[in-house]
Image (cartoon, grey):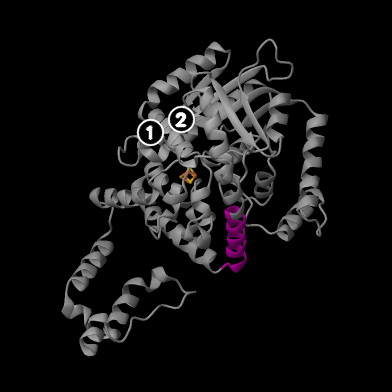
């Protein structure tokens, strides 16, 4: 199925799913409440956002220099960088790193990039056992689903649903609440950690620090600290857009990510990790960063939209997006759902096949307003639409529709035509897109112009 058709069909399905919409709504309400409290920590929040946006802009405009700096400093510290220009190369490189260690099993932290390159299914297909150690990721993995949201992968699932899933997998009680579920998953993880040596762990990275060759990771569960302390080899997978200039910049980015990601002043565990030094007691002997492009340089090549590479993946734009709130994360059919995905994915995966995502917006500007990196999201969506038309991706039916719309809107005579003709025209063009589950609105019997004339 073409990505556009897949998107339309999943969206129609999700729109009718009241339980899911309710879960997203409740999450949104809780998020807003927590965000309001966390933001109070700032004396001058605008300054923090300006500073962060400037730092990421500087990196994006000089990405080649910063990436080389990062590699050089990491190598000086005893680590290694592996470059991967696409998903397939990344998967093969990672498999080779695992096989070289003779590992049969890898422990993973949550990483949206691993979803993007479809790492789990590839490794499992290559007889490597993959264990997700983040609870949200563990739940969607058991459910054989993609993450629903970049920060909260299982936010669409009710406690009951999760208890049911885990009952079949690890014997969790069907009546278990959130606390019981967490405790059961923790027990499972602890039993893994205490029984067997961890040969290889794979984590993502929130930031790659150019001047120190270190990787910054933030989390709430402590699972990353656990696996990175116990493993012999630590493989970090990161997009080339994750660079920040210096170690000092962490004090700008960690609180912003916590505030806008989960509504916390700071997340529970914040680590800056690098290769093992002689003073380290329990760090992995081998530290490798796999730097992945996978379409990011296509976005970098767009001077008008490359600002989107500043994204720190907090998920705030999805939390306030009226479209995301109705259709949820899975309908987008791409790794990064919500407004930021609608901006980046058409460039990273092909404008022709994914341009429809840039049309999935009300252009209300909620996303732009909340973004801590001040990314001009809704205008980037318009720029994507412009590019798609200029590059000839608009279909004939779409062109005809807009031609007719323009003709209609520019003619007073047409505007004053009877409601029945207008309703017929609207239904002919928009009924399918409007969906079966919603009643199609009807236009007023008389136009405003007619009413005005009659009353004056
Ligand atoms: S675009 Fe902005 S709000 Fe959306 S995930 Fe990225 S940083 Fe957060």
Answer with the quarter of the image where residue 228 lies.
top right
The residue at 34%/50% (across/down) is 379
Left or right: 284, with 172 as reference point: left
For the image, the number of numbered tags is 2
Residue 240 badge: 2
Q: Nearer the viewer, residue 88 or 293?
A: 293
The residue at 46%/30% (across/down) is 240
Q: Name the spot of residue 291 as percent of width and height, x first.
A: 49, 27
Relative to 165, residue 409 above or below? below
Relative to 69, residue 216 above or below? below
Q: Quadrant of the C terminus?
A: bottom left
Q: Residue furthest front?
A: 43
Secondary structure of the residue carrying numbered label 2:
helix
Left or right: 291, with 432 as reference point: right
Answer with the quarter of the image where residue 394 lies.
bottom left
Residue 297 badge: 1
- Report crowding for label 2: few under 14, some 14 to 19, many 20 or more residues within 10 A (C-alpha): many
Magenta highlight: main SS: helix
Q: Name the spot of residue 1 as percent of width and height, x first.
A: 45, 56
Q: Earlier in the sequence, mark 1 or mark 2?
A: 2
Q: Are marks 1 and 2 in contact (CB under 8 Å)?
A: yes
In this orientation, does residue 151 appear?
Answer: no
Separation of residues labelled 1 and 2 (CA atoms): 9 Å
Q: Which residues are magenta?
A: 17-32
Secondary structure of the residue carrying numbered label 1:
helix
- Report crowding for label 1: few under 14, some 14 to 19, many 20 or more residues within 10 A (C-alpha): some
Q: Name the spot of residue 88 as percent of width and height, x first.
A: 49, 34
The verdict on label 2 being within 8 Å of ligand 1 is no
Relative to 133, residue 248 above or below? above
The residue at 78%/50% (across/down) is 179
Q: Is residue 326 magenta?
A: no
Left or right: 171, with 329 as reference point: right
């Amino acid at each position: 199925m073409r990505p556009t058709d897949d998107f339309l069909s999943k969206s129609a399905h999700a729109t009718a799913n009241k339980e899911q919409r309710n879960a997203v709504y409740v999450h949104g309400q809780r998020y807003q409440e927590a965000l309001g409290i966390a933001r109070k920590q700032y004396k001058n929040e605008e300054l923090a956002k300006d500073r962060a946006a400037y730092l990421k802009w500087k990196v994006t405009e000089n990405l080649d220099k910063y990436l080389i700096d990062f590699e050089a400093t990491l190598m000086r510290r005893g680590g290694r960088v592996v470059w991967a220009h696409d998903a397939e190369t990344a998967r093969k490189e990672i498999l080779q790193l695992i096989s070289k260690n003779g590992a049969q099993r890898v422990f993973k932290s949550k990483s949206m990039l691993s979803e993007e390159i479809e790492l789990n299914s590839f490794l499992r297909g290559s007889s490597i056992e993959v264990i997700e150690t983040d609870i949200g990721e563990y739940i969607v993995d058991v459910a054989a689903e993609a993450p629903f949201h970049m920060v909260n992968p299982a936010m669409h699932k009710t406690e009951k649903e999760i208890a049911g899933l885990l009952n079949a997998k690890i014997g969790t009680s069907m009546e278990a609440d959130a606390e019981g579920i967490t405790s059961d998953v923790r027990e499972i993880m602890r039993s893994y950690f205490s029984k067997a040596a961890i040969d290889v762990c794979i984590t993502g990275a929130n930031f790659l620090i150019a001047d120190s060759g270190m990787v910054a990771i933030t989390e709430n569960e402590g699972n990353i600290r656990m696996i990175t302390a116990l493993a012999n080899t630590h493989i970090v997978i990161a997009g080339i857009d994750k660079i920040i200039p210096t170690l000092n910049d962490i004090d700008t980015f960690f609180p912003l990510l916590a505030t806008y990601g989960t509504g916390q002043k700071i997340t529970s565990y914040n680590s800056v990790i690098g290769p093992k030094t002689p003073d380290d007691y329990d760090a992995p002997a081998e530290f490798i960063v796999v730097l992945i492009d996978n379409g990011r340089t296509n976005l970098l090549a767009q001077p008008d939209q490359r600002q989107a590479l500043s994204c720190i993946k907090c998920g705030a734009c999805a939390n306030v997006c009226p479209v995301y709130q109705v259709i949820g994360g899975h309908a987008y059919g791409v790794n990064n759902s919500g407004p930021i995905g609608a901006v980046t994915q058409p460039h990273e995966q092909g404008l022709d096949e994914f341009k429809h995502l840039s049309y999935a917006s009300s252009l209300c500007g909620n996303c732009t307003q909340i973004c801590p990196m001040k990314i001009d999201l809704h205008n980037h969506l318009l720029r994507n639409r412009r590019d798609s038309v200029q590059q000839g991706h608009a279909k004939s039916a779409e062109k005809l529709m807009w031609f007719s719309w323009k003709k209609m809107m520019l003619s007073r005579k047409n505007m004053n035509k009877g409601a029945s003709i207008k309703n017929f025209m609207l239904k002919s063009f928009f009924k399918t897109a409007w969906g079966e589950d919603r009643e199609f609105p009807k236009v007023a019997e008389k136009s405003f112009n007619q009413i005005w004339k009659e009353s004056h």
